[in-house]
């Protein structure tokens, strides 16, 4: 049976979700995303530059909503109100698409989520018909609370956004996973392929990353590596790892040795 | 009349609508969304929406982000 990721009733073959920020240009964005195999891509919502060249390409010309699930984020929002306004604008921008990545930040230095505002926004957005994928701290109780509010995916950070420090508290991610009934996607902090594999081996439904690919020396090559890391981590999780032991256990038979 | 668009003051003829504002500012009319005085305008009503003096608008688009 095919192993698919299901979010808000839609199914995806890829468990790698990618951001579109920090790339050199749209061409590098497109080639990296193609190499990653991602089907869900995030975008930010920002003011249009007044007086800009109206023929200037738009990111949605490069990433067609017909081909990708476009996941607008609320990055840069520090209050529930700002995040809700951004989601409502995104819904009109994307012709009624209700799927959003909610992200309410706490401060500029850590970019940690402001959880009281995140909870407030999640509640109002779900009530307004949005399908909310929510960036959050790795607190198991708050993750469960967000699920209870009706979020379609809960996305705890591995470590601070853009830090590349990998999964700093795998035990919390495990605790979140043990209680979860919606897909848990590690969002933010992944630095290299092994970090992505670890998230998948823990049992996460997917990983969302941006900087790890965009700021690699060779983004397309890193995108390929991440695709494989996600797939191998997932297979290892499904295969069920061997039990860890404190002492050695020989791999060759101990009987029939020559004397 | 005077509008506030994305934080900047913009002068436009009385009786203009959003279609005319976007033309004047050379902003593409697709893949944008507009908030008028704190209320997001449904796509279907966007271009014909009438404007009045002192209206505050936010016009947004999608850009790269994570």
Image (cartoon, coloured by chain):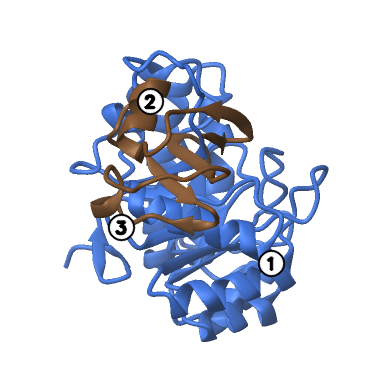
Residue A151 % position (x, y):
47, 74
A28 to the left or right of A9: right
Chain under disc 1: A
What colour do you see for chain B?
A: brown
Say which element carries label 1: loop
Q: Is residue A215 above or below residue A226?
A: above
Viewer-nearest of labels 3 and 1? 3
Q: CA distance from mark 3 to mark 1?
A: 28 Å
Seen at 24% across and 65% down, the residue is A10
Query: Where is mark 1, residue-wise?
Result: A138
Seen at 46% across and 67% down, the residue is A132
Chain under disc 2: B
Query: Where is mark 2, residue-wise?
Result: B27
Query: Where is mark 3, residue-wise?
Result: A97
Q: CA distance from mark 2 to mark 3?
A: 22 Å
Say which element carries label 2: loop
Residue A86 % position (x, y):
52, 53
């Amino acid at each position: 049976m095919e192993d698919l990721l299901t979010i808000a009733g839609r199914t995806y073959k890829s468990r790698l979700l990618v951001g579109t920020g920090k790339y050199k240009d749209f061409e590098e964005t497109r080639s990296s995303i193609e190499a990653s195999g991602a089907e869900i891509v995030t975008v930010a919502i920002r003011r249009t530059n007044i007086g800009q060249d109206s023929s200037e390409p738009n990111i949605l010309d490069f990433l067609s909503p017909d081909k990708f699930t476009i996941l607008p984020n609320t990055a840069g929002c520090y209050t529930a109100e700002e995040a809700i306004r951004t989601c409502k604008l995104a819904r009109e921008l994307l012709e009624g698409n209700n799927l959003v990545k909610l992200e309410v930040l706490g401060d500029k230095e850590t970019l940690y989520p402001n959880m009281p505002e995140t909870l407030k926004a999640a509640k109002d957005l779900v009530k307004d018909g949005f399908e909310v994928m929510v960036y959050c701290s790795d607190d198991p109780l708050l993750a469960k609370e967000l699920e209870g509010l009706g979020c379609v995916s809960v996305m705890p950070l591995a470590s601070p956004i853009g830090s590349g420090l990998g999964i700093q508290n795998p035990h919390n991610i495990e605790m979140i996973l043990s209680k979860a009934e919606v897909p848990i996607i590690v969002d933010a902090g992944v630095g290299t392929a092994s970090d992505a594999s670890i998230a998948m081996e823990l049992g996460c439904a997917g990983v969302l990353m941006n900087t790890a690919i965009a700021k690699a020396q060779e983004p397309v090559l890193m995108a390929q590596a991440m695709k494989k890391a996600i797939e191998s981590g997932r297979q290892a999780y499904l295969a069920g790892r061997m039990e860890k032991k404190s002492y050695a256990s020989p791999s060759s038979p101990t009987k029939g040795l020559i004397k | 009349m005077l509008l506030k668009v994305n934080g900047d003051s913009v002068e436009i003829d009385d009786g203009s609508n959003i279609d005319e504002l976007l033309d004047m500012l050379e902003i593409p009319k697709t893949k944008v969304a507009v908030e008028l005085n704190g209320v997001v305008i449904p796509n279907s009503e966007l271009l014909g929406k009438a404007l009045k003096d002192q209206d505050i608008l936010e016009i947004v688009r999608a850009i790269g982000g994570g």
